Image: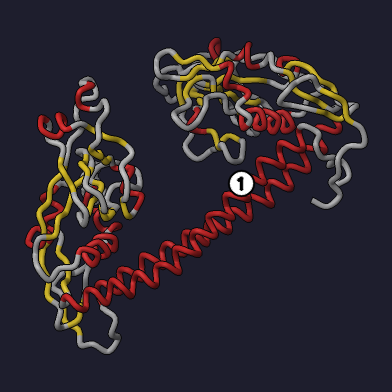
Amino acid sequence: MSGVQPYPEYKESGVEWLGEIPAHWGLHALKRSVTGCVNGIWGEEPSGQDDLVVLRVADFDRTALKVSNEKLTYRYITPKESEKRLLKSGDLLIEKSGGGEKTLVGCVVLFEHEYAAVSSNFVAKMSPRCGFDSRYLTYGFSHLYDRKVNFMSIKQTTGIQNIDSDSYLSNYFCFPDTAEQQRIADYLDREIARIDNLIAEKQNFINLLKEKRQALISHIVTKGLDPNVKMKDSGVEWIGEVPEHWGSGKIKYLASISNGATPSRDNPEYWEDGSIGWLNSSKINDGVITQADQFITEKALKETSVQPVTEGDILIAITGEGQTRGRVAICMIEATINQHLAAIRINKSGVDVEYIHFWMTSQYDRIRYESSGAGSTKGAITCADIGSYPAPIPPHDEQQRIVEHLKAALRKYDAILGETGISVELLKEHRTALISAAVTGKIDVRNA
């Protein structure tokens, strides 16, 4: 950030979270910078004529702070309904209803397109007033969102967050003149693009490492550690050749397979003061499960069909359209599982649990494809499906050598992945801090 220094003179803003602002900047309510909020409309099914793009919260690119054009939705909006709602390039869109457990409602993005569009009923249009740069306002609203200034204006009565726009826009913010707003926006456009390029490069590196990690597991659990070993056809097309001395077996001949349940949330006797761990599918992402986040009672264990699991059980997520379905983890505690998980308990002598865990890990892509009905919308794995999965089985001592070899190799991969992930998070924090510093006048970027 060469050429960036504090402003020569500051004054108190009188706003606690804003602090000091440059002496020549103005301070006034946000409502003076935009023409209020014009609520959107959902319209009717598209007619094929006079249809308009209706922008939804799903079209918000929250990182770029802009509207995404990836999956635009067309709806029929009458000319009367669209007249005051039509967007023009430079308008801002604010999420008025929505949010979630981890995200507050109130995100603002910039519309920079020329096609005819309106906002949906969960989104409102805010047009910048004369003298206000739309890009500067977008960065300003981003800072307010990150500082959770919108929190006090949120009402939640039906499980959906709604933002009181009049209350939110009554908050005070600092504004330089139009020319300086534009210079700040130009600076942030350049710097944020640079940071985003770095993040994208690191994310691509992470994805490449994950692919190599998965390929390494797949190769070792099907080809072994000896590159000169004599091979044979496994008899399974997608497995290919395996070492000649290896055996094979379906999971159902190696283990017992079961899945769990969720005790009724309406019965407090199943949950209050519970001491028995209860695992849902989100825990699968731990890889090695060492603790539970939720707990049920002895009564729930006795009266419901929750499934007990114990140390050494392999857990697999069996439902969902996200990335979780098909992932596996090793359970290292005594607990219970819900209906979205299945437990694989190895009961055949000479079969190493960690080896089977690695084998199941290597089959993630195939399991995902097959559990989607080879392209349909099945989206689930059954215990019978799991039982039918074939696995090559090396001699027990070779299984153990494979496990130790993979553990050592994966420690190196995981260390690099961890370090790179931390650097991505630091870049994201720097991005947020830079926007904050620029739009609140903590740094002077006019000559940067």
Query: In which image quadrant can residue 151 be found?
Result: top right
Name the residue located 19 percent from the left edge and 29 percent from the top edge. 263
> Considering only vertical position in the picture, is 75 above or below 330?
above
**Residue ID at (71%, 36%):** 436
Q: Residue furthest right?
A: 8
Q: Position of residue 109 (x, y in %)?
A: 61, 31
Side of 289 where 257 appears, left or right? left
186 to the left or right of 40: right
Rendered image quadrant of residue 111:
top right
**Vertical side of 396 occupied by 53: above or below:** above
For label 1, the residue is 428
Q: Where does residue 88 sit, x and y in percent of width and height?
A: 66, 25
Q: How is the image coloured?
A: secondary structure
Is 180 in front, or is 158?
A: 158
Where is residue 266 shown, x and y percent of the image?
23, 20
Give amino acid for label 1: Lys
Q: Residue at x 36, y 71 (%)?
A: 216
Q: What residue do we see at 63% from left, 45% from top?
A: 429
